[in-house]
Amino acid sequence: MTAKTILLTGASRGIGRAAAEAFAAAGYRVALVARDGDALSALAETLRPADVLPIPADISDPQAASSIVTQTTRHFGTVDVLINNAGVGITGASHTINMGELAQVMDVNFLAPVRLMQAVVPEMQTAGGGLIINVSSIIGKRATPLSGGYCASKAALEHIVESMRVELTRDNIRFSTLYPGVTRTDFTLRTLGEPQPRAGRVRGVSAERVAAQLLWMIKKEPRDAYVTLFDRVFVTSSHLFPRLFDFLLAWYFR
């Protein structure tokens, strides 16, 4: 376990920061990626003497993925686990959504993870395999009103991963997806679009609990994982009773 190298995006705050702390404490080597170089350096100092490598980078830059993977392999020699955690939200009615902001969300939540997966796959093929974990959301499984753009970005990522999983089976590259529900972080403070009056009504779980689930996923490699029983029941029930959930969500967001 302690020999594994993890490449983690969105590492400077929220779920990413909690995950970085959990991975370092468990003995993993961690490449930390985030836009805020100062916050990343400060985090790295708190994690030492764990073997960590801060990589300030904007993953929405099309050239960033190759550079991130190159820096990681140069320092650690390999990438055993890639965790696509970085993301940005957007709220507002889908029929009036700002297309420029939607493009930004799709770039960060969908295109950037795809570029990172494309960059890391050759390294994993050479090494004989690897694990890729994508942090999605339960509303990537069942879209909710006023979050259509964010839901779409997560759903798109899920579907391309379904293809990659089959395509790369012979290369021993495995894929897991985490579907958190509401999490207590500052994520909503940086969400694009129109502020929603019901935002923050559900308290959610701590970032540390989500990080613990990621740590478990590295060890057990499930196809899909949820943080709470409610999250799993929400997704399963919404697929079994779609019309009922249409009604309930319309009532809740009225």
Image (cartoon, grey):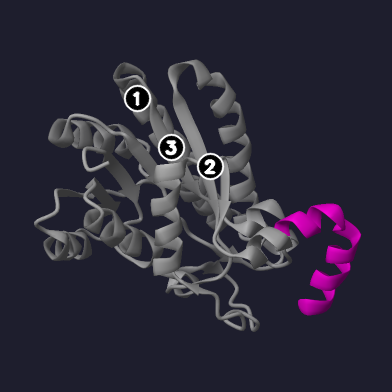
Label 2 near label 1: C-beta < 8 Å? no
* Quadrant where the image shows the C terminus: bottom right
State which tag comes first along the sequence, 1 or 3. 1
Q: Callout 2: 10 Å neighbours few (<14), some, many (20+)?
A: some
164 vs 11, left or right, is right
Badge 3 marks a residue whose secondary structure is: strand
Residue beneath disc 3: 132
Residue beneath disc 1: 124
State which tag comes first along the sequence, 1 or 2. 1
Q: Real-space Cα distance between discs 1 and 2?
A: 19 Å
Residue beneath disc 2: 222
Q: Which mark is residue 37?
A: none
Mark whose residue sits in front, 3 or 2: 2
Nearest the viewer among 207 and 254 is: 207
**Residue 153's spot in the image, x, y percent?**
59, 49
149 vs 127, left or right, is right
**Residue 187's spot in the image, x, y percent?**
46, 69
Please, what is the dominant secondary structure of the magenta stretch? helix
Badge 2 marks a residue whose secondary structure is: loop
Nearest the viewer among 2 and 128 is: 2
**Residue 57's spot in the image, x, y percent?**
27, 48
* Quadrant where the image shows the N terminus: top left
Residue at 65% from the left image edge and 82% from the top image edge: 198
Query: Per the image, is 239 magenta?
Result: yes
- Amino acid type at circle 1 is Met
The reply to whether residue 254 is in sight is no
- Amino acid type at circle 2 is Pro
